[in-house]
Amino acid sequence: MPQIPDRNGDLRKWLGSVNPTGTPPASRASSNSTRLLKITVVEAPTNDRSALLTAITGAGYEASAFDDGDRYLGASAALDTDCLIVGVHAPPSSARVIVECVKPHFRGPILLISACRQVGPVLAALRAGACEYLEEPLNSAKTVTAIQNAIEGRLDGFRYRSPAAEADLINRFGHLLTGREKDVVLRLVAGLSSRQIGQQLGISPRTVDIYRTNVMVKLNVRRTVDLVRMAFHGAEAPRLAADRLR
C-alpha cells in the first residue's frame, strides 16, 4: 500500500519530484491548443480496466493507467493529468492514501471506481477529497458523462460539511424512519460495515442488512454511498418513496 509522505517535509520533496513547477497541471496552459485532455487511471478493478480505457480513448481523451498505487505516486508525471480515476478495493485499500497525497497539489477532479461492497474504504477516499463514486459494473456512457461533468466542473464533490452531518441527515428524514433504522443509518453514513453495526447494536449482520434495505426504499436511494452524498451535501432525497405512492 502506498505510504503517505511525511508531513514535515517529505511531501513537499515528493511533490517537487513529480511536478517541479509546483503548478497543478490542470491549471497550466498547454503549448498545443489541440492537446487531448488526459485521464489517468490508478488501480482500476481488473474486470473493468480494459473497457474503461477503451471508453476513455473512444470519447477522445488520452488515457494512461497504473496497476499499482506506489508506482503511480513514484512516477515523474503523477500530477500531469486532467482527471484522476482511482480504484477502491476491499481493505486494506490504498485509495484514501492516493487521494490524500495528490489532492493538496492537484486542482483537477478525482473519481473513484469500486466493486467493493464495504462503504468504509469508499467513504474514507471521499472524505480525503474525491468528488464522485462510480459503482461496478461500469456503464461506458455514464462513465464518460461523469468524467466530462467532473472536468467541466459540474460536480460539487463530496464535501464533508461537519461532524454533525450524519445527525443533520436524521433531522431532515428521521420522521420517515423507525428508531432502529435511525441507529443503522447513522452508522452506515459513518462508514461502518454491517458486521460492525451489528456488534454495536447487538443484532445480526443479516438484520442490519434488512434495516439498510428498508432505509434505501424509504429514501429512494440505491446505494449506501448515496446516503453519504445526502449527508455531505445536505441534499434532498431523490423523490421519496412515500411521494411515489401518492
Image: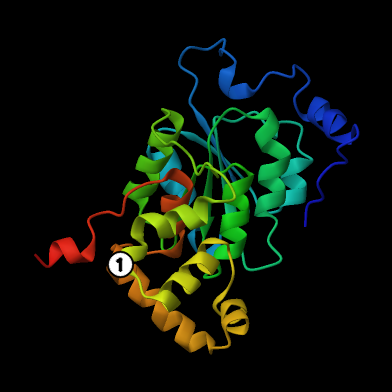
**Residue 161 visible in the shown view:** yes
Is residue 195 shown left or right of residue 93? left
At 48% from the left and 59% from the top, the residue drawn is 48
At 32% from the left and 49% from the top, the residue drawn is 236
Quadrant in which the C terminus appears: bottom left
- Up-down: is 146 above or below 238? above
**Residue 44 visible in the shown view:** no
Is residue 33 shown left or right of residue 128? left
Is residue 184 shown left or right of residue 80? left
Location of residue 226 in the rendering, given as x and y in whole percent from the top left corner = 41, 57
At 67% from the left and 51% from the top, the residue drawn is 96
Q: Judge by depth and name the residue closer to the eye, 38 or 208.
A: 208
- Up-down: is 48 above or below 154? below
Amino acid, disc 1: Leu
Q: Judge by depth and name the residue closer to the eye, 85 or 118.
A: 118
Location of residue 126 in the rendering, given as x and y in whole percent from the top left corner = 57, 49
Location of residue 204 in the rendering, given as x and y in whole percent from the top left corner = 53, 89
Badge 1 crowding class, 10 Å Cα cut-off, few under 14, some 14 to 19, many 20 or more, is some
Location of residue 108 in the rendering, given as x and y in whole percent from the top left corner = 55, 30
The local secondary structure at tag 1 comes to helix
- Up-down: is 201 above or below 119? below
Q: Residue furthest left?
A: 246
Label 1 belongs to which residue? 176
- The number of discs equals 1
Q: Judge by depth and name the residue closer to the eye, 8 or 214.
A: 214
